[in-house]
Amino acid sequence: MTFKEKFGFGCMRLPLTDKEDPTSIDQKLFNEMVDIYMEKGFNYFDTSYAYHNGISEIAIRKALVERYPRESFKICDKMPTWALSSEKDNDKFVSEMLERLGIDYFDVFFVHNINIPWYKLAENAKTFEYVKKMKETGIAKKIGFSFHDNSKLLKEVLDKYGDFLDIVQLELNYLDWKDPAIEAQKCYEICVEYGLDVYVMEPLKGGVIVNPPKEIEEDFKKFNPDKSIASFALRFCASLEHVKIVLSGMSNMDDLIDNCNTFENFEVLTNQESEFLEKMADKLNSRLAVPCSECGYCIDACPEMIPIPEYFRLYNNSKNQPESNIYRNYFDKLADEKVPADDCTYCGTCLDYCTQHIDIAEELEKVCEHFKEGFSAYS
């Protein structure tokens, strides 16, 4: 496998015509991005039943399936684990996904987002056994699961099902590599131990890595002004021997071109670069108020539907730019247009769904204190 083959197009954050409406995919721009990506020799697309409220799969059908020969591309899709209530749901969702995409088989199929609560749902619906049959009947060429939890649960799942699985998709980036809450390195090593390929999601940690404080941005420019921050993060992941795919969710053409360039002219990360990224990870972690990757699973779990990732983004931005008052205005606007952060009831429902293992209620309280009391105490 060449490094060029490792670059996958993540379809969770596609270009939108209305930033407030995840279903408003800019189909024209997405088609153009797909064309460039394919022309450059890349061909792997990752989606899910849930992405863009189900519209991601339809957008892929329009941009890819209806415009290119089936053998020229690969599609990965995922079972909506959280929606499983019985064994019959497996057939129902797979049939719907195939119909949305306009295909008759998946190149890769995952049980989506295995964590403690959703693993129980997958067990109850016998979904791992179901995907095994998908591979046996040719509906899926390769199978596995995407994972958002600790190494103990990962080992438990692999002890039970690892003998017939091909892949584990992990959240992996240089910011989380040594984080004891995420255990990215440990999870990677467990997958290697079980002989499974690793596919990488969130190499940019939902944009956190590529939107650092100005001080860290300047550090990157001094270290190498010719390479983007994103390119370092992607190369960190792709340089790992057992990583076979690195996904990047791209919502604009500039990001697509930059990422394509990284893999077209791939350079394995040097020891000097690895040491630099470790320093940057320590520095960024020390400046990051809340390590949220903006996956959004907490919103679906929240009974109040509080837009938690948006509040955490504002909080992080405000802490890194204490001289600016604009984020207070955004905080008030978000509360007026959606749900106030202090509507949190401390029910704890979201905790099991947070991929970063954040104490969400406690952090939301800090967010409210920060924006209601002003910035002087935090600057």
Image: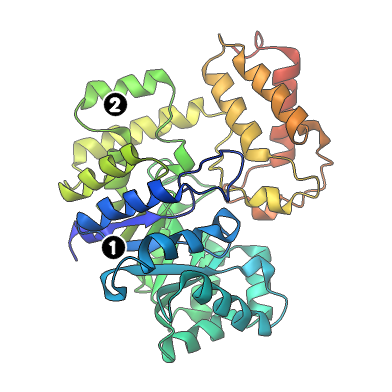
One can see residue 149 in this view = no
Residue at 29% x, 26% y is 220
| Residue 217 sits in quarter | top left
* Label 1: how many Cα within 10 Å (few below 14, some 14–19, many 20+): many
Q: Is 40 rendered above or below residue 66?
A: above
Residue at the disc numbered 1: 43
Residue situated in front as seen by the camera: 222 or 278: 222
| Residue 42 sits in quarter | bottom left
State which quarter of the image contains the C terminus: top right
The CA span between labels 1 and 2 is: 30 Å
Residue at the disc numbered 2: 220
Q: How many marks?
A: 2
Residue 261 point in image, percent of width and height: 21, 44
The answer to whether residue 258 is left or right of residue 101 is left
Q: Is 370 rendered above or below residue 29?
A: above
**Residue type at the position of mark 1:** Asn
At mark 2, the secondary structure is helix
Residue situated in front as seen by the camera: 251 or 246: 251
**Residue type at the position of mark 2:** Phe
